[in-house]
Image: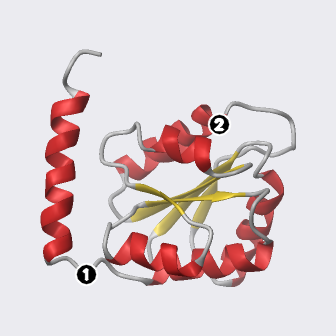
Amino acid sequence: MKKIFIGADHGGFELKIELCDYLTTQFVEFEDLGIYSSDSVDYPDIASKVCNLVNKDNNSFGVLICGTGVGISIAANKHRNIRAALCHDTYTAKMARAHNDANVLCMGGRIIGKEVAKEILSVFLNVDFEGGRHKRRLDKITELEKTEFNSPV
């Protein structure tokens, strides 16, 4: 199983605690990158911490949680080689992995309950990328990244 780097802002703090407890019971190796209280922080900072580590370790996934999951998923997808998927149900989590080879799972701590979040995380961690026609599409996204990340704003 891949190592998990997990982080949250204040809107996802409580759900992050639940998911860390869940990962412990499932014997999944993870690193909690914060935050460690409900104090307000900026979600782009947490997204960067997690995404930078995922980029350094090809045998890892990231899990990011903010209030809705939207802001932190936008921030995560600004990082090269990150395919962050905002998932609020198990079907989306399954397709994010099977078709999109997502390497970062984003969730909204104020949107979904803890039991659903655990199910989503379990599916995300246990579904493999299917490749095939989906690989061809990801290759196109990689080419787009090369063009967009190297062009001036």
| Crowd class of label 1 (few under 14; some 14 to 19; many from 20; radius 10 Å) | some
Amino acid at dot 2: Tyr
Measured as percent of width and height from the top left, residue 55 is found at: 36, 48
> What kind of element bears circle 2?
helix
Measured as percent of width and height from the top left, residue 116 is found at: 71, 78
Rendered-image quadrant of the N terminus? bottom left
The quadrant holding residue 45 is top right
Point 19% across, 25% down: residue: 150
Position of 107 relative to 119 (above/below): above
Q: Which residue is mark 2?
A: 43
Rendered-image quadrant of the C terminus? top left
Q: Which mark is residue 130?
A: 1
Farthest top residue in view: 152
In-image side of 50 versus 149 (left or right) = right
Q: Are marks 1 and 2 in contact (CB under 8 Å)?
A: no
Mark 1 / mark 2, whichever is N-terminal? 2
Point 25% across, 30% down: residue: 149
Amino acid at dot 1: Glu
Choose between 56 and 85: the one closer to the eye. 85
Instruction: State the colouring used for the structure image.
Output: secondary structure
Position of 138 relative to 113 (above/below): above
In-image side of 125 versus 129 (left or right) = right
Measured as percent of width and height from the top left, residue 70 is found at: 60, 47
In-image side of 46 versus 91 (left or right) = right
Point 23% across, 15% down: residue: 152
| Crowd class of label 2 (few under 14; some 14 to 19; many from 20; radius 10 Å) | many
Choose between 26 and 80: the one closer to the eye. 80
Measured as percent of width and height from the top left, residue 39 is found at: 86, 36
Farthest right residue in view: 38
> What kind of element bears circle 1?
loop
Choose between 92 and 80: the one closer to the eye. 92
